[in-house]
Image (cartoon, rainbow, N blue to C red):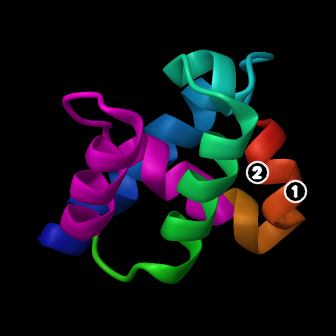
Amino acid sequence: MKKSRYLVLSAVAVLTLAFASVNLASMLGISTVAAKKVIDIIDTASTVATIISLIGVIVGVGGITAGLVTTAKAMIKKYGKKYATMW
């Protein structure tokens, strides 16, 4: 049940965010260096809860949706870290 929820959430996030022309840095209001750190954390961390808490600490925001994280992980796998940072 949990996997199917994440699958649906990630599919919605991909469809919603794939067509956005705004990059991660401007979307979160952070610098590109911070965006690179976020992408590195997403690439290396294993659980969504860990990723959310680490991103909150680094960029100083209250939280980030699991869909954004899932989409970023998919973009890292498909296009690489550099493209995911610019997304």
| Residue located 46% across and 42% down the image | 68
The answer to whether residue 39 is above or below residue 11 is below
| Residue located 28% across and 43% down the image | 56
The answer to whether residue 15 is above or below residue 71 is above
Question: Which three-letter amino acid code belongs to the residue tagged 1?
Answer: Lys
| Residue located 45% across and 52% down the image | 69
| Residue located 14% across and 69% down the image | 2
Determine whether, in the image, residue 9 is placed left or right of residue 50. Answer: right
Task: Using a 10 Å C-alpha cutoff, classify the residue at mark 1 as few (fewer than 14 neighbours), some (14 to 19) or many (20 or more).
Answer: few
Secondary structure under tag 2 reads: helix
Q: Quadrant of residue 59?
A: top left
Q: Quadrant of residue 64?
A: top left
The residue closer to the viewer here, 16 or 61, is 61
Cα gap from disc 1 to disc 2, whole angstroms: 5 Å
Residue of label 1: 82
Residue of label 2: 84
Question: Which three-letter amino acid code belongs to the residue tagged 2?
Answer: Ala
Q: For the magenta stretch, what is the residue range?
A: 48-74
Q: Quadrant of the N terminus?
A: bottom left
Contact (Cβ within 8 Å) of mark 1 with mark 2: yes
| Residue 66: x %, y % from top left | 32, 48
- Figure label count: 2
| Residue 33: x %, y % from top left | 71, 44
The numbered disc on residue 10 is: none
Residue 54 lies within the magenta run = yes
Task: Using a 10 Å C-alpha cutoff, classify the residue at mark 2 as few (fewer than 14 neighbours), some (14 to 19) or many (20 or more).
Answer: many
The answer to whether residue 81 is above or below residue 57 is below
Secondary structure under tag 1 reads: helix
Determine whether, in the image, residue 65 is placed left or right of residue 78. Answer: left
